[in-house]
Image: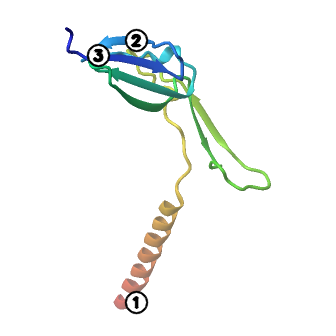
Amino acid sequence: MDDKSTIFIFLDGDPKPIATFASPANFELDTRKLVDGDHTLRIVSKDPTGKEGLRVIPFQVSNGPAISVEGIKEHARVDGILPLMINAYGKGDQKKFLIVGSETPQTIPSWVWILIIGFAGWALYYSIMYLNIKS
């Protein structure tokens, strides 16, 4: 009698398992064959006595080029003309890293401007106070 559990792996509600293994198992899911978007991995294990265990893992596939948008957030309320900065870049393959276009240019955050203005104000105040003491 076999005392190992059997593992069935299902993808996106398909009634036919994509893989069946005896426990323990190593499995590689090739996401390049899946369309970009939300998917669900359902793993069912059945022990030798017939009892079943279930684990459902939702995941998101993003094999296509990454898209970065600056100038609007999701679910934003907007009006007028919006200047948008859009960058799309591919990841290349696993053996070669693409440096060209892999970084998204961004505007300077407002907290950096506040920090610069604050420092400039302090430096100006310090300079004026220093000049007043000497004269």
Q: Position of residue 15 (x, y in %)?
A: 52, 16
Which x, y percent locates residue 104? 53, 38
User: Which disc number belongs to residue 19?
Assistant: 2
In front here: 91 or 114? 91
Q: In the rendered structure, are the residues bearing label 2 and label 3 in contact, judged by CB atoms less than 8 Å apart?
A: no
Q: Nearer the viewer, mark 2 or mark 1?
A: 2
> Mark 2 vs mark 1: which is more N-terminal?
2
Q: Earlier in the sequence, mark 3 or mark 1?
A: 3
CA gap, disc 2 and disc 3: 11 Å
84 on left or right of 96: right
Q: Is residue 103 above or below residue 72?
A: above
Q: Nearer the viewer, residue 99 or 124?
A: 99
Which secondary structure lies at badge 2? strand
At 37% from the left and 11% from the top, the residue drawn is 20
**Residue found 38% across the figure and 15% down from its top:** 95
Residue under numbered circle 1: 132
Residue at screen point 67% across, 53% down: 76
Quick one: SS at disc 3? loop
Which numbered circle lies on residue 26? 3
Type of the residue with mark 2: Ala
